[in-house]
Image: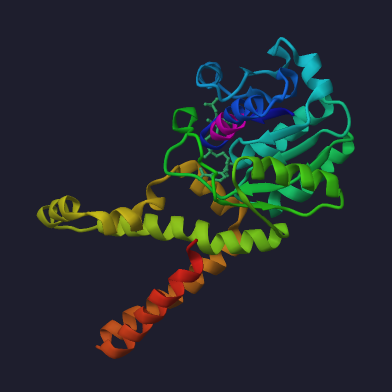
Amino acid sequence: MNIGIVGLGLIGGSLGLDILAANKNLYEEGFFLDELNYVWGLSRSMETCRYASEISAVNIAAVDINDLPNHNYIFENTDIVVICTPIAAILPTIAALAPKFSPNVIFTDVGSVKSAIVEPASKICEQSGQRFVGSHPMAGNASQGISAAKWNLFKNRPCVVTPSADSEAVREVRSLWQSVGMNIYECSPEEHDRAVAMISHAPVMISASLIAACQQEGDAGVLKLAQNLASSGFCDTSRVGGGNPELGRLMAEYNQPALLRSLQTYQHSLQEVISLIENKQWAELEAFLANTQRDRAFYMD
Ligand code: NAP
């Protein structure tokens, strides 16, 4: 397969590392050199492109696709282009690239929102004879950029693929993510956005608010003590609030209605807890916590 990765950061770089690492196994299984995966990359900075080549996240990379020495071959022979830029750059990137490729190339993206992307991206691709299927690999960490890229980031993690009338394109995109160990879930962009608002986007805002609330402690001695005493519990609950600020902002901007609905539901839950504590309803509070202890299991592997 010839695969393009645009945006060589945590997600794009990690994808390239796994795809190229798989070449070794394919080679040992008897595949010929020209049957192995070839990965070209594009990113905003030349330094990122160089680093991505050095760590074998790509075979070749450049800032401008026309600067790739084999760009005419790439336009004719790419199978899938995976857009791994920040959300705001996904549609403009597809619009700029799609017309350059020969027809039928499949474009996919990794954006953390799907409603704002899938329909317009499909239309853009259609106009130049390309195909689009949305993806969201649910894997990541608090780091960003190519230096955060790592092997096996996607292994055993869920990945959403959005449906399309083009079943062959959907199959190709599913098999790309399966090849790096992901478990595929197919759902509409709207269902995706509602579900991720609950389990990914709202937790970022809640976790960030927890950190901000702690920082409001007015007694400098108590604040310092709290910072020194913070251990595994605070580390778990604050982790996603300490992640990439640009990503958090874009999740909110591009998934506003679903995120607001989740945060308002959370606000009701928190208010319920506050009133149980205010009214010293200890038995009811314990019952509430027993329910959450039981229900947490539904969200774990
Ligand atoms: P990231 O580490 O910041 O990587 C994005 C990379 O894209 C940057 O390193 C930048 O590379 C490059 N870039 C920015 N604008 C570009 C443009 N216009 N054209 C080409 N390259 C550009 O971010 P990420 O965490 O990988 O997130 C990328 C995408 O994955 C986002 O759409 C996000 O919603 C999605 N996602 C993220 C996570 C997560 O937990 N992080 C999980 C699932 C999906 P340079 O170094 O060259 O500037």
Main SS class of the magenta portion in the image: helix
Q: Which residues are magenta?
A: 12-19
Res 212 quadrant in image: bottom left
138 is higher (above) or lower (below) than 277? above
- Residue 215 visible to the viewer: no
Q: Is residue 107 magenta?
A: no
**Quarter of the picture for ligand 1?**
top right
Disc count in the image?
0
285 is higher (above) or lower (below) than 71? below
Q: Position of residue 176 (x, y in %)?
A: 69, 40
Q: Residue furthest top?
A: 69
Res 37 quadrant in image: top right
Residue occupying the point 71% across, 9% down: 69
Residue occupying the point 78% across, 54% down: 163
6 is higher (above) or lower (below) than 214? above
Q: Position of residue 129 (x, y in %)?
A: 89, 35
Which of the two residues, 114 or 161, is positioned nearer the viewer here? 161
